[in-house]
Image (cartoon, helix red, strand yellow):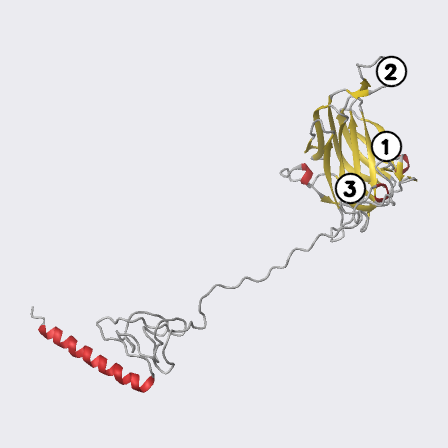
Amino acid sequence: MNTKPRTLIIGLLLAAVAAWAACAADTVGNGTPGTAGSTGSGTGVAGTTGSGTGVAGTTGAAGTTGAGTGVAGTTGTSTGVAGTTGTGTGVAGTTGTGTGVAGTTGAAGAPVVQKDCATKATVADPVLLNFETYDGTIAADMFGAPFGVLPVGPQTPYAGPYSFGDGSATPTLAILGGHPPSTWALSQTVVGARTWGMGGGIWMGCANASAYKGIAFWVRGSSPNATFSFSLAMDSTTLPNATNPAGGGICPGTTDTCKHPTKQNIPLTADWTQVQIPWAEFTGGLSGTTAVVPNGNNISGLGWSVGLKFQLDPSVPADAAGPYIAVPGDLAINIDDLAFIP
């Protein structure tokens, strides 16, 4: 096939386009005309939302919304000549791109340090902690529940269990089967304690339960002495926080003269038994040099202790006054349905 006519036609067309581009440069802008070519050799500038090397004419290169290789004009195929908006590097349109600057996130406020009973709830519902809202999945020492004020609101206090050992063995704290018909109860056990035993308790928001007569709960367990003790933590019998004195209790004494009121020698058997302790049966409370007899107000926690049996050190004579040492042993206590006595 003879290609000379096609070559001649293409040449004529390119010459015509070049002539037109030169004319357009004189009438609508001051940009440099693009070099003629079959497919154009410059990059057309985007329309209102794009960017490019040359600024689009009235119709923009490659249409009003796109960029592409082509000559200015409705569908031209060469580098678009600047129109009435001048020439140069095209500026991004109104929806241009870029990295957004992150907003400023406020720093978390420091927790407020205050005394244990700086805020206090007046108990209107006797149920303290029955573990029935436990979901069976979280660790026992992570469990907490509201108490004392219904319906639950911003001022409602919470309570939950904690555990500690004597340094010789670590107790296991769990929430297991409860006192029937209860589904759940707190369980604390230790194997091979050798120093004095184990202890635990209930942390709680400060409460005024003076409208009630005392504290009640169900308990079962085992210990060499078949007994345990139970105490009331109060702001007046608790030392200030050792790290920040602005927190903790208000007792002006020392570890020897800040003592929680305690009920000693409560029977501990393998069968569930309900224990009721009126406020007046808690004894031995001290706030510095002042004796403390609880009345249900300013209660900031509950505690218990399950001890080992002690014997005279075998290395001393039988009639010696001491020392006495602990007999290693296993301990267990289950507690359920803690409530204030109406």
- Return the residue nearer the eye: 295 or 291: 291
Q: Could you tell me how far apart the alpha carbons at marks 1 and 2 are, in whole angstroms?
A: 30 Å
Query: Is residue 275 shown to the viewer in this render?
Result: yes
Residue furthest left in the image: 2
Q: Where is residue 221 in the image (x, y as percent from the top left)?
A: 75, 26
Q: In the picture shown, does residue 116 fall above or below 63?
A: above
Q: Could you tell me how far apart the alpha carbons at marks 3 and 2 are, in whole angstroms?
A: 47 Å
Q: Position of residue 80 (x, y in %)?
A: 30, 76
Q: Residue at point 89% right, 34% down?
A: 284
Q: Position of residue 326 (x, y in %)?
A: 78, 21
Q: Is residue 197 left or right of residue 214?
A: left
Residue occupied by mark 2: 320
Mark in front: 3 vs 2: 2
Which element type, helix, strand or loop, lies under badge 3? strand
Residue occupied by mark 1: 263
Within 10 Å of the Cα at label 3, are there few (<14), some (14-19), or many (20+) other Cα atoms?
many
Mark in front: 1 vs 3: 1
Q: Residue at point 31% right, 87% down?
A: 27
* Lower sequence index among marks 1 and 2: 1
Which element type, helix, strand or loop, lies under badge 2? loop
